[in-house]
């Protein structure tokens, strides 16, 4: 430890160095607080390792919060992409605040994490139905879920602060080595974070394990700094948070699937109900149960003399629909359920044990993906209440079942029906217009008016297919159908399509509560950036419009690409994780290309990018659903990934030549935050139209890179003079921590 380095060590004695005779140890003329002060674990102190671990920890904690918070505070689940926006903002602010070496020895991370945990435990939602006569549709009808609207900005603020503390060392680390090398290590760490969380989800771990891993990663980062008394304090604080999480989970019977926090409870009659994320979701109905919903048996009452040799049930859940089909003589059932834990509960606990029947084949898959991969014909296809309470990812408004309820999906069901087959769907529908919308979509897809039975004001069963089309006068042989309810007011519902897969929107629009939430977050973000810039003395000219626009464009592009992946390959958690992993892998490939080509003009990359966007626009995902499957997957992967790859070529080219890597990265992340809010435009335009906006934004980025230089873009290839604080950073030498 040199004299110069000692000047940069902030001691634990009010910041003032004490005379050597008052110190426990003095070594080499340097003032040392404790015998262990100045000690660092060599490998963990290296810049490359610290950057890798920082990126890994940031991505892992981000995924953990996005997964854990909505599962407990369901109000946040309806705004889950706001947690992603908060993460981008937090990382950007962390880079801003840490760009001059600011990284307090008493880390606020543990205290902020404790605040998040305490908040989640305080507002955790767990609704139970007291009797079989009580109906529960969602948050709107139950006072237990009546949370204040301020919950959202409060959680967003906590997540921003938490991620900002993790990102404090990111700026100096990015500037400590050549930009492309730093970017490659950052991406590798992010990929490791995704892989680690995916593995933990695959093996069914619970949040206690996630928090242990998160605390271990942060502890490793702490050990990479010079050890002082504050190292011990930070370690004890992290241990206390972990103990808080462990104690808070004691006695809980939560089952964590890749999608939900699942619990079970029994009512007085003995009927077992399952809740997901604290909301009643389904029940394990035994055969012959009194008071069971009418729609389960509706198709069998319409056609009492028919049997169905081949049956497909999508949304088979815990097995009640399969048990009823078996009781009515089904020859064979393919029971498709996307959540493996829900299906396993049915295998173990359903009173009629339908999954143990040799006539039932349990399948864990997305329903749309299964239809695409099978050539079987079915006599009966049932969509059995496949309404999820979660989104495919935090980066889009697509629900797990969104692509099941589009006109293209109904057409796919039609193609899998036998010559006298029938398609049935039933659910609790809260509004007449929703039943009307589904009826219209069925008529558009099958070419005839469907059978519709409405029970009260909220439940309905609908049916279409060759069997219905062949009915004389459109009426079934036994029980009659009530018909599609007429709309007495409001606009005619817009059919859901693969491009606009929003079943639960009556017409294209953005709800006022989303607009209000976006406004609050953007205003808060602007204020936070202004404060962070003021604290660090960062002027507006240090921000990069070029990298900011690249961030906006890339977030929109990846949102649209992930939506395409969900449609083409399924909405399962594994597909989503692999898609994210593939996007980051394409970044590494782009970095390798730019490090080898040494091009001096980015225009060719932009031309390739615009061409790939044009191809993706002219070939929407639904047009790629052709046979043979191997060719479909190959073409779909190329069309979907090509724009992402060329966009990464564009970014890595600009990043290669920047001398302000920290501010370029911060500007890019803040742009990604804005892109996350613009994603809501898809609720109006559909996802395909986002490509037009993406192309315009990349055109603007090209102008900022080649024609119109503003702010930090003027110095894109010039030295960042006057920004150094303290000793100059030498590549491969760890920046001196404060």
Image (cartoon, rainbow, N blue to C red):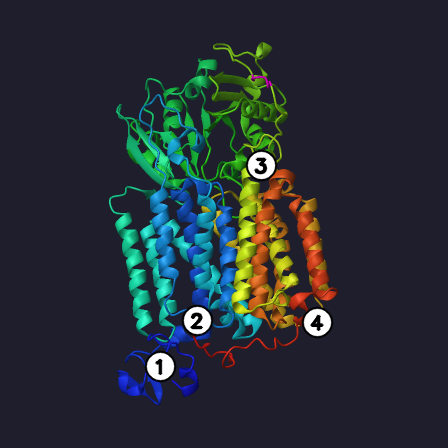
How much space separates mark 2 and mark 3, taking CA atoms? 43 Å
Measure the C-alpha gap from mark 2 to mark 1: 30 Å
Q: Earlier in the sequence, mark 4 or mark 3?
A: 3
Circle 3 Cα neighbour tier, 10 Å, few/some/many (<14 / 14–19 / ≥20): many
| Residue at the extreme bottom of the image, as rendered | 28
Nearer to us in this view, 524 or 351: 524
The Cα atoms of the two marked residues, 4 and 1, are separated by 51 Å
Q: Read off the residue under disc 4.
A: 600
Mark 1 surroundings: few (<14), some (14-19) or many (≥20) residues within 10 A = some
Disc 3, SS: loop
- Range drawn in magenta: 484-488
Q: Is residue 303 visible?
A: no
Residue at image position (60%, 45%) is 632
Q: Are marks 2 and 1 in contact (CB under 8 Å)?
A: no
In-image side of 384 versus 716 (left or right): left
Taking the view exactly as shown, the residue that stands out farthest to the right is: 707
Q: Marks 1 and 3, how far apart in space?
A: 64 Å
Taking the spot 53% from the left edge, 34% from the top edge, the residue there is: 404
Q: Are marks 1 and 3 in contact (CB under 8 Å)?
A: no
Q: Earlier in the sequence, mark 4 or mark 1?
A: 1
Which label sits on residue 49? Answer: 2
């Amino acid at each position: 430890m040199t004299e110069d380095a000692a000047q940069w060590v902030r001691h634990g004695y009010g910041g003032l160095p004490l005379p050597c005779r008052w110190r426990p140890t003095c070594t080499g003329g340097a003032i040392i607080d404790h015998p262990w002060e100045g000690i660092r674990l060599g490998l963990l102190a290296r810049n490359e390792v610290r950057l890798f671990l920082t990126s890994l920890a940031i991505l892992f904690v981000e995924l953990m919060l996005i997964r854990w918070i909505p599962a407990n505070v369901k109000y946040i689940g309806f705004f889950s992409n706001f947690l992603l926006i908060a993460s981008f903002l937090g990382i950007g602010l962390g880079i801003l605040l840490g760009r001059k070496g600011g990284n307090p020895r008493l880390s606020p991370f543990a205290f902020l994490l404790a605040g998040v945990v305490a908040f989640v435990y305080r507002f955790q939602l767990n609704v139970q139905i007291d009797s079989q006569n009580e109906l529960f549709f969602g948050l709107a009808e139950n006072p237990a879920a009546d949370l204040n609207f301020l919950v959202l900005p409060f959680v967003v603020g906590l997540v921003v602060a938490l991620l900002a503390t993790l990102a404090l060392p990111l700026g100096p680390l990015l500037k400590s080595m050549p930009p492309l090398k730093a970017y490659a290590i950052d991406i590798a760490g992010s990929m490791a974070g995704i892989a680690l969380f995916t593995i933990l989800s695959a093996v069914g771990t619970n949040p206690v394990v996630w928090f242990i891993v998160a605390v271990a990663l942060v502890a490793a980062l702490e050990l990479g700094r010079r050890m002082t008394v504050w190292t011990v304090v930070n370690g004890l604080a992290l241990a206390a948070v972990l103990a808080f999480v462990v104690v808070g989970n004691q006695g809980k019977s939560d089952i964590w699937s890749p999608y939900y926090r699942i619990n079970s409870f029994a009512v007085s009659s003995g009927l077992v109900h399952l809740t997901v994320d604290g909301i009643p979701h389904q029940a394990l109905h035994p055969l012959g149960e009194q008071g069971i919903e009418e729609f389960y048996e509706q198709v069998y009452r319409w056609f009492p003399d028919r049997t169905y040799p081949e049956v497909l049930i999508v949304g088979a859940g815990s097995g009640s629909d399969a048990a009823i089909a078996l009781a009515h003589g089904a020859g064979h059932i393919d029971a498709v359920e996307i959540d493996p834990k829900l299906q396993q509960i049915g295998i173990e606990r359903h009173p009629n044990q339908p999954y143990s029947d040799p006539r039932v084949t349990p399948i864990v898959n997305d329903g749309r993906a299964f239809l695409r991969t099978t050539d079987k014909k079915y006599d009966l296809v049932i969509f059995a209440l496949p309404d999820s309470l979660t989104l495919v990812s935090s980066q889009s408004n697509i629900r797990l079942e969104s692509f099941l309820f589009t006109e293209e999906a109904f057409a796919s069901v039609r193609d899998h029906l036998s010559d006298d087959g029938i398609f049935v769907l039933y659910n609790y529908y809260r509004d007449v217009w929703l039943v009307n919308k589904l009826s219209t979509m069925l008529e558009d897809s099958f070419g005839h008016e469907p059978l519709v039975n409405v029970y009260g004001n909220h439940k309905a069963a609908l049916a279409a297919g060759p069997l219905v089309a062949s009915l004389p006068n459109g009426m079934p042989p036994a029980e009659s159908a009530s018909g599609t309810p007429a709309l007495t007011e409001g606009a005619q519902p817009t059919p859901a399509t693969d491009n606009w897969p929003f079943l639960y929107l009556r017409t294209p629009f953005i709800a006022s509560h989303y607009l209000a939430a976006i406004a609050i977050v953007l205003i808060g973000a602007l204020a936070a950036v202004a404060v962070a810039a003021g604290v660090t003395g960062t002027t507006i000219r240090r921000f990069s419009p070029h990298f900011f626009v690249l961030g906006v464009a890339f977030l929109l592009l990846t949102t649209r690409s992930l939506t395409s992946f969900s449609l083409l390959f399924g909405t399962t958690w594994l597909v989503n994780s692999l898609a994210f992993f593939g996007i980051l892998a394409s970044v590494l490939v782009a970095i390798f290309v730019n490090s080898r080509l040494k091009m001096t003009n980015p225009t060719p990359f932009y031309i390739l990018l615009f061409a790939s966007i044009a191809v993706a626009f002219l070939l929407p995902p639904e047009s790629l659903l052709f046979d043979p499957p191997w060719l479909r997957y190959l073409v779909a992967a190329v069309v979907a990934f090509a724009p992402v790859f060329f966009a990464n070529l564009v970014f890595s080219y600009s990043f290669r030549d920047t001398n302000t890597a920290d501010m370029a990265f911060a500007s890019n992340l803040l742009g990604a935050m804005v892109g996350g809010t613009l994603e809501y435009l898809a609720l109006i335009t559909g996802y395909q139209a986002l490509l037009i906006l993406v192309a315009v934004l990349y055109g603007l980025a090209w102008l900022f890179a080649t024609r119109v230089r503003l702010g930090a873009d003027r110095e894109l290839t010039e030295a960042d003079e006057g920004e150094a604080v303290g000793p100059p950073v030498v590549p491969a030498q760890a920046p001196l921590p404060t």
